[in-house]
Amino acid sequence: MIYRKFGRTDAMVSQLGFGAMRFPLTEPYDPTKIDEVKAAEMLHYAIDNGVNFIDSAYPYHRQTSEIFLGKALKNGYRRKVYLSTKLPVWLVKAKTDSLRYFDEQLQRLQVDQIDMYLLHSLGKNSWKTVNEYGILDFVDKILDAEKIRYAGFSYHDDLPLFKEIVDAYPWKFCLIHLNYVDDQYQAGLEGMEYAYKKGLAVMVMEPLRGGRLANNVPPEVLSIMQQSGRTQTPAEFALRWVLNRPEVSCVLSGMSTLEQVIANVSFAAEEHVNSLTEEDLQLYYQAKKFYHSKTKVSCSQCGYCQPCKQKIPISFILDLYNDACMYDAVKESSWAYRVFIKPENRGDQCTECGECEEKCPQKIPVSELIKEAHELLK
């Protein structure tokens, strides 16, 4: 296993981290039904072979991921890893809530200290919550009490706000969405470079875009990959792009099978920093252009369409619709649609009031497309 510096700290983390949000299930549409035998086998194999960063969050597997990890990391495994989890900022409604959720997470994980603690999914609204309810003061307190070792945040919004948040607190690390198709999405490459120059360790989520860059890869992209001269899987092609960057401390992969763990661990045992040539990078650009050419909806995820009177998560549904079309991922998008959106908030509940379309800067025919998406994903 190759290890990288964790920003300006003394920690060295495995370049592959284990994201604890896609464990195998005993019932396909119930995320709480983790197949604990298979999941523990996967987790222990990864740790036994050098993975030392485990990442979870309060809501993962509908609040059962942390509980599972508390059991799975017994018998000496806890001492072998950096354990990371996240505060559910969107649930904070009072100044006392942060500590309440944090204490609950300590109990779930069966630990007295969490190594890396993040404010989860920061964006415009959640950043307001952070400031309104003194969450940064709370972070200071648990740092001073040595209940956490390093403070960071995960991010899902535009680049300017990302830079503002980076500059607002002495963070040790950040977690951003990044892959070769989404290199300008949210924080993107520019945000990665900005955080790195400020001394933060940069962690990357969605390097395979939830498996979409590894599964059902179209012949056009496979042909582009072959031009590299390397024998590689689509997953390796995608991971290599992220791990090529020296700014990246660790890539998180939400693995669902032991076979995925074995393959990713083997790939992470090799050095990949600065391994890509300009010719290689041009191939990634071609693959990105092909995927973008299949975009169904030109939604920028600005969120102006929200809130919807029917509480329909418009941007999320359109993103799933795009994924289904761009990556031939109908099955995966349908699973997310059915698991994460309640029946009363799905696309067929649209009343065609038109308010979202009036607010949309892209003038997207939301009422029409949201129902198209429902028909495909229901």
Image (tube, rainbow, N blue to C red):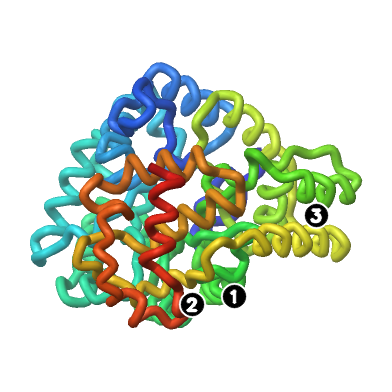
Q: Amino acid at mark 1?
A: Glu
Q: Which mark is on residue 159?
A: 2
Where residue 88 appears, x then y in whole percent? Answer: 25, 55
Q: Residue at x 38, y 56 (%)?
A: 371
Q: Is residue 144 visible?
A: no
Pick whichever, 71 or 312, lies toward us.
312
Front residue of this view, candidates 269 and 350? 350
Q: Choose mark 3 or mark 1, whichever is in front.
A: 1
Instruction: Give left or right: position of 292 versus 34.
Output: right
Mark 2 / mark 1, whichever is N-terminal: 2
Tags 2 and 1 touching, CB below 8 Å: yes
Local secondary structure at mark 3: loop
Q: Residues within 10 Å of mark 2 (few under 14, many from 20)?
A: some
Q: Residue at x 54, y 30 (%)?
A: 46
Residue 284 is situated, as x and y percent measured from the top left of the image, at 76, 59
Q: Position of residue 206 (x, y in %)?
A: 53, 51
Q: Secondary structure at mark 2?
A: helix
Q: Which residue is tagged 3?
A: 275
Q: Which residue is mark 1?
A: 190
Disc 3 versus disc 1: distance between alpha carbons? Answer: 20 Å
> Which is more N-terminal, label 1 or label 3?
1
Look at label 2 and name its amino acid.
Answer: Leu
